[in-house]
Image (tube, coloured by chain):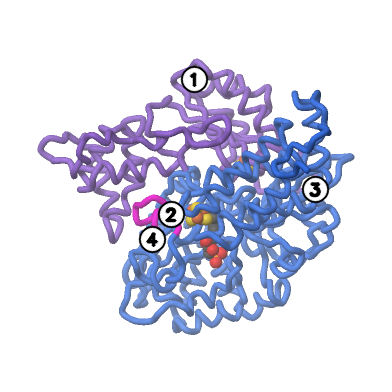
Chain colours: A purple, B blue
């Protein structure tokens, strides 16, 4: 679920779900004649629609394509996807706001998800997240989100950098990690999940 | 013990079709397709294989519930894997995607399904890319498509990426999400076996469940049923995390002692510490304590102990950690992931978090513990799906089993806070209605 803005005492801030101007009529299916869609984006969405028995199943892949293309699920991008899929922008916006990975507000180009769920927090994730947030506070290029369990508790505390899983990340590695992100380098290559052998095959007594 | 799922899991290139076939891959598919559908289903029934995604329902039985007839039948593989503490499907898909694909094709044959989908959580970018490549390889080799291996079986397989929502692991929410909607669970019945994807009959199984199918065909259902215990057959991947020396996935035979897994395989907590509590089946399972370590790890023993095997994710918490922090993290997660459709779940998770926050701020009283217990009682069984229960059960169990610690914590925090300076026992009872 997308982040809900809350008061300190926990209640929802009124208007947290206000995505539309209620004084206007709801937008209909966009007119292809007046909605220019980048050819690449159109081709990608059409290819996705062809994969399913019902074209509407392509809503998530289409929004992902919009996000890749525009950097976020912008109203303009959603309108383009709606135009290709023959749906209303309102429908796609409703879908986009449900999912954590779609950004419906402009955001940094680099997405850094720090897991702060149980297993990671038992191994110092809250401090790690705090440290990363501090370091990137004034970097508009980096979006830091504290995330729920990313399915890699074996490398806790862990971080996903633009989809690449790294961990366990020590506090003194944060500088290096963020430096890698800023300079478009492979993030902490020695700590990446893809290189990790299965714990089941390691000889006994090899724990860290 | 012979490994079935993790056999040579780290063999280089196992994710490619060449290495997989060299090791006998897709031979079970060939064998299955030479048998009648019913015979394949009988093997699965005989194996006693129970679903590995959480509910533990017998897989063969689920297939036999599907209506026969001219309808399109769908198969959905649940690869959403978002239950905190669970990461077994990730390792399987990343290192041995073809085993899953072979399992899907055989299961689809037994179920009479012609269209299949893998719903994988969007965060698993690497694994989804590997699956995409593997599906392409399988298509090229003629294992997917029309007339598979010369038989009358045809099957398409689409890898569908989610976008970050725990609730989409719930089977009916998964279907809505796969249909391109917000992932809200549906009212059951009708169950997916009757009305699932696009209103058609649908078989939904977890990655590990489906990946076990080739092994069952290889050794025969009866031989598989001899592994494990009588009602929890076979081997299981367990994800062990938290305060252990060797966190990771281990393949075990169901019925081994939990101590063997936590201490023997995962190395136990760091030196000088002991197990305070552990979740036996992901963060949704009621917690067990250090006294329960000698329980056998299987579906029924865990249920009898008041918890559940769930997804097979063991989270270990040692004696240096405050139970309040663990309860808070747990409740916070479910509040964030509640889809908001039912009031008990949406409000109950929110109020539980608020009360735990009050405890941390030193503003709570022991009465809050009773309120939490009552909130949890009022969630359980009163919601559309079990996400609400999934918060109520573990948090409720923590409050019940560690009540003393909660009370000490509340008092200690109160002393530290601004309330600590106030007179703890005013002369007149201030609680409403309690004035004499
Ligand atoms: C809130 C919630 C989340 C779930 N998440 C998952 C999941 O991530 N993966 C999974 O396989 N099953 C998950 N399940 C269980 C599924 O609903 C379903 O029972 C399972 O996929 C069936 O497969 P199986 O019989 O092979 O276990 C979840 C259930 C609930 C209520
Ligand atoms: S129990 Fe919670 S997550 Fe499940 S349908 Fe109801 S509100 Fe949604
Ligand atoms: S708790 Fe962080 S990856 Fe699971």
| Residue B184 image label | 2
Q: Residues within 10 Å of mark 4 (few under 14, many from 20)?
A: many
Helix, strand or loop under label 1? helix
Asked if one can make out residue B213 in the rendered structure from this viewpoint, the answer is yes
Chain ID at mark 2: B
- In the displayed orientation, state which residue is furthest to the top: A138
In this image, B369 relative to A147: left or right?
A: right
Q: Nearer the viewer, residue B311 or B30?
A: B311
Q: Quadrant of the N terminus of chain B?
A: bottom right
Q: Which residue is mark 4?
A: B157
Q: Residue at x 42, y 49 (%)?
A: B161
Helix, strand or loop under label 2? loop
In this image, B377 relative to B148: left or right?
A: right
Chain ID at mark 3: B
Q: Is mark 1 within 8 Å of ligand 3?
A: no
Camera-side mark, 2 or 4: 2
Q: Which residue is mark 1?
A: A182
First in residue order: circle 4 vs circle 3: 4
- In the displayed orientation, state which residue is furthest to the front: B436
In this image, A68 relative to B304: left or right?
A: left
Asked if one can make out residue A196 in the rendered structure from this viewpoint, the answer is no
Residue A93, given in percent of the width and then of the height, sits at 32, 41
Q: Quadrant of the C terminus of chain B?
A: top right
Q: Magenta segment range?
A: B176-185
Q: CA distance from mark 1 to mark 2?
A: 37 Å
Dominant SS in magenta: loop
Do discs 3 and 1 share a chain? no
Q: CA distance from mark 2 to mark 4?
A: 24 Å
Q: CA distance from mark 4 to mark 3?
A: 50 Å
Q: Residue at x 50, y 60 (%)?
A: B384
Q: CA distance from mark 3 to mark 2?
A: 35 Å
């Amino acid at each position: 679920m997308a982040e809900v803005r809350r008061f300190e005492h926990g209640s929802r801030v009124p208007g947290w779900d206000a995505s539309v101007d209620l004084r206007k009529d709801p937008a209909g299916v966009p007119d292809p004649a007046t909605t220019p869609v980048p050819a690449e984006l159109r081709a990608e969405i059409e290819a996705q629609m062809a994969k399913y028995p019902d074209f509407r199943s392509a809503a998530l892949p289409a929004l992902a394509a919009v996000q890749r293309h525009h950097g976020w699920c912008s109203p303009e991008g959603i309108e383009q996807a709606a135009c290709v899929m023959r749906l209303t922008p309102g429908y796609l916006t409703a879908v986009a706001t449900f999912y954590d990975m779609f950004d419906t507000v402009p955001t940094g180009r680099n997405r850094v998800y720090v897991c702060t769920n149980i297993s990671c927090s038992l191994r110092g994730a809250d401090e790690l997240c705090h440290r990363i947030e501090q370091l990137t506070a004034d970097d508009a290029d980096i979006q830091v989100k504290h995330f729920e369990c990313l399915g890699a508790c074996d490398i806790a505390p862990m971080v996903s950098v633009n989809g690449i899983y790294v961990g366990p990340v020590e506090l003194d590695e944060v500088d290096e990690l963020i430096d890698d992100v800023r300079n478009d380098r492979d993030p902490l290559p020695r700590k990446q999940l893809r290189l990790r052998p299965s714990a089941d095959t390691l000889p006994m007594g090899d724990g860290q | 013990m012979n490994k079935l799922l993790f056999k040579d899991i780290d063999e280089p290139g196992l994710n490619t079709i060449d290495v997989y076939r060299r090791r006998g891959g897709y031979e079970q598919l060939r064998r299955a397709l030479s048998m009648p559908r019913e015979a394949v289903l009988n093997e699965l029934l005989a194996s006693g294989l129970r679903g590995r995604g959480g509910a533990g329902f017998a897989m063969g039985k689920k297939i036999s519930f599907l209506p026969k007839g001219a309808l399109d039948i769908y198969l959905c593989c649940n690869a959403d894997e978002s239950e905190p503490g669970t990461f077994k499907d990730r390792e399987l898909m990343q290192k041995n995607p073809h085993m899953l694909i072979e399992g899907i094709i055989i299961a689809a044959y037994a179920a009479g399904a012609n269209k299949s989908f893998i719903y994988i959580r969007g965060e698993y970018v690497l694994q989804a890319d590997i699956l995409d490549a593997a599906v392409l390889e399988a298509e090229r080799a003629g294992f997917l498509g029309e007339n598979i291996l010369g038989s009358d079986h045809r099957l398409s397989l689409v890898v569908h990426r989610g976008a970050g929502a725990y609730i989409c692991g719930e089977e009916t929410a998964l279907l809505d999400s796969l249909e391109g909607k917000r992932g809200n669970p549906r009212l059951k019945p009708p169950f997916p076996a009757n009305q699932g994807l696009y209103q058609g009959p649908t078989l939904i199984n977890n990655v590990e469940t489906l990946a076990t199918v080739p092994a069952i065909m290889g050794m025969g259902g009866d031989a598989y049923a001899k592994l494990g215990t009588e009602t929890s057959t076979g081997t299981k991947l367990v994800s062990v995390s938290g305060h252990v020396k060797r966190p990771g996935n281990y393949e075990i035979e169901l019925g081994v002692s939990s101590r063997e897994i936590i201490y023997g395989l995962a190395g136990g907590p760091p030196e000088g510490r002991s197990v305070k509590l552990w979740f036996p089946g992901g963060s949704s399972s009621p917690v067990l304590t250090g006294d329960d370590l000698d329980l056998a790890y299987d579906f029924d023993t865990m249920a009898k102990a008041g918890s559940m095997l769930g997804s097979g994710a063991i989270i270990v918490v040692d004696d240096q950690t405050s139970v309040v922090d663990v309860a808070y993290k747990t409740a916070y997660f479910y509040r964030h992931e509640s889809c908001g459709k039912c009031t008990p779940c949406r409000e109950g998770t929110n109020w539980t978090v608020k009360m735990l926050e009050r405890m941390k701020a030193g503003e709570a009283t022991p009465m809050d513990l009773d309120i939490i217990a009552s909130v949890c009682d009022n969630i359980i069984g009163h919601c559309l799906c079990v996400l609400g229960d999934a918060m109520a059960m573990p948090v409720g169990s923590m409050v019940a089993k560690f009540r003393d610690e909660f009370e000490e914590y509340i008092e200690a925090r109160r002393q530290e806070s601004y309330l600590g300076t106030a007179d703890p026992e005013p002369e007149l009872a201030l609680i409403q209605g309690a004035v004499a």
